Image (spheres, rainbow, N blue to C red):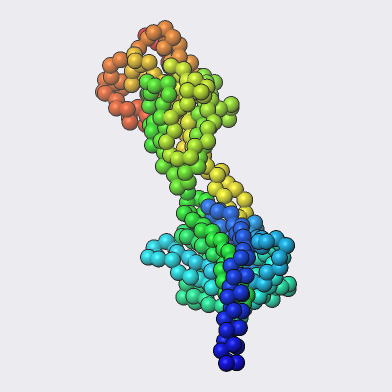
């Protein structure tokens, strides 16, 4: 009879324990910015094979519910990695803390998690480490200072102690697409350089690893001697884009027929050591009327590249209604578009002085 009573009391105690634990909750907020490039030495110390004590902008915020109740908990942490080429993610490290108390809110920094840290957060001995993956990762960051391309996941679970009931959790996954800022490329697709566009609301397209970007359009003025000089002024358009296609907005500053414009795409590469602006090449396009010829547009582009003193000549021709037709010849032989471009490149390299007249 006594053994039955004892078993009954143990059962009641277990039910009460689980009921109390289930009524409690710990809201977990894992703070980990999603950088494009991460310098490994700021996160992991190879010499000690442990986390660094001051990871920038990293922390775990715990908020107990109800807020006025002290809750004894343990915390389970999992670091999971899937490097480029891996078939599936693998756990790099699984660790668990000794019991500690959460009263109201509690903030845990990287300093609280490193080995030998003082305070009430203690990592239990015997953490499960994937030595093969650890060696692979360490070999990589010995030669290259940034984390390799892949997915990096940190998961946190808060468990009741005793009872092992899950009270809350959070996880963050970082997607590293480039091992360095220099690897990220922006490829402009449309319009092509020197294209004549009949629409006042052209559509621009490009290819880039980052979806968030900024498109800028500058008017080409007669005194501009290079695209680089033109894009130092006030932009005709400066718009933020989430994607890789943008159609000129009717609400933006209007484009004018017959004028030339430069456009490019820029994006910001974020890292745990600051940000870097990445810019594409600069391309020119013209909003053309129906009577503008391909030859006129080609010469306008070449004259613009060669120097501002020749560009007004074409503007004057256009204002007078003069059109360029027929073929371009040199000493009686037909010159292709590519040959004409090479000819002007030679003029630029040799600093040849040109005298141009209209006949």
* Total numbered labels placed on residues in the image: 0
The residue shown at (62%, 50%) is 274
Residue that lies at the very extreme toward the left in this rendered image: 333
In the image, 133 versus 89, the foreground residue is 89
Residue 109 falls in which quadrant of the image? Answer: bottom right
Q: Position of residue 349 (x, y in %)?
A: 45, 33
In the rendered view, tell whether residue 260 sits above or below residue 270: above
In the rendered view, tell whether residue 11 sits above or below residue 222: below
Question: Could you tell me which quadrant the N terminus lies in?
Answer: bottom right
In the image, 162 versus 336, the foreground residue is 162
In the rendered view, tell whether residue 180 sits above or below residue 301: below
The residue shown at (45%, 69%) is 90
Q: Position of residue 89 (x, y in %)?
A: 44, 66
The residue shown at (45%, 64%) is 82
Residue 94 falls in which quadrant of the image? Answer: bottom right
Question: Could you tell me which quadrant the C terminus lies in?
Answer: top left
The residue shown at (60%, 48%) is 275
Residue that lies at the very extreme toward the front in this rendered image: 1
């Amino acid at each position: 009879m006594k053994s039955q009573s004892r078993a009954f009391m143990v059962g009641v105690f277990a039910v009460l324990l689980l009921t109390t634990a289930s009524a409690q909750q710990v809201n977990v907020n894992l703070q980990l910015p999603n950088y494009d490039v991460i310098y490994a030495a700021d996160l992991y110390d190879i010499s000690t094979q442990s986390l660094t004590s001051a990871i920038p902008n990293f922390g775990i915020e715990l908020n107990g519910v109800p807020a006025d109740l002290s809750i004894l908990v343990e915390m389970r942490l999992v670091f999971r990695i899937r490097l480029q080429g891996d078939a599936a993610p693998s756990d790099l490290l699984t660790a668990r803390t000794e019991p500690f108390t959460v009263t109201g809110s509690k903030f845990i920094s990287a300093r609280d998690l490193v080995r030998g840290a003082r305070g009430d957060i203690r990592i239990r001995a015997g953490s499960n480490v994937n030595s093969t993956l650890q060696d692979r990762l360490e070999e990589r960051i010995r030669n290259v200072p940034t984390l390799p391309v892949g997915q990096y996941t940190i998961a946190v679970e808060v468990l009741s102690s005793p009872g092992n009931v899950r009270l809350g959790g959070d996880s963050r996954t970082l997607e590293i697409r480039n091992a360095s800022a220099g690897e990220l490329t922006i490829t402009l697709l449309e319009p092509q350089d020197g294209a004549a566009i009949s629409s006042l609301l052209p559509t621009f397209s490009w290819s880039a690893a980052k979806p968030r970007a900024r498109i800028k359009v500058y008017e080409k003025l007669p005194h501009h001697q290079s695209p680089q000089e033109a894009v130092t002024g006030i932009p005709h358009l400066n718009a933020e884009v989430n994607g890789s296609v943008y159609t000129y907005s009717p609400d933006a500053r209007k484009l004018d027929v017959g004028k030339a414009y430069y456009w490019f795409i820029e994006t910001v590469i974020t890292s745990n050591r600051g940000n870097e602006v990445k810019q594409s090449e600069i391309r020119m396009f013209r909003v053309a009327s129906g009577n503008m010829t391909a030859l006129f547009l080609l010469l306008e582009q070449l004259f613009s590249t060669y120097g501002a003193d020749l560009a007004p000549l074409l503007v004057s021709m256009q204002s007078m209604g003069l059109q360029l037709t027929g073929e371009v010849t040199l000493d009686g032989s037909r010159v292709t578009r590519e040959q004409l471009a090479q000819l002007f490149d030679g003029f630029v390299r040799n600093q040849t002085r040109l005298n141009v007249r209209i006949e």
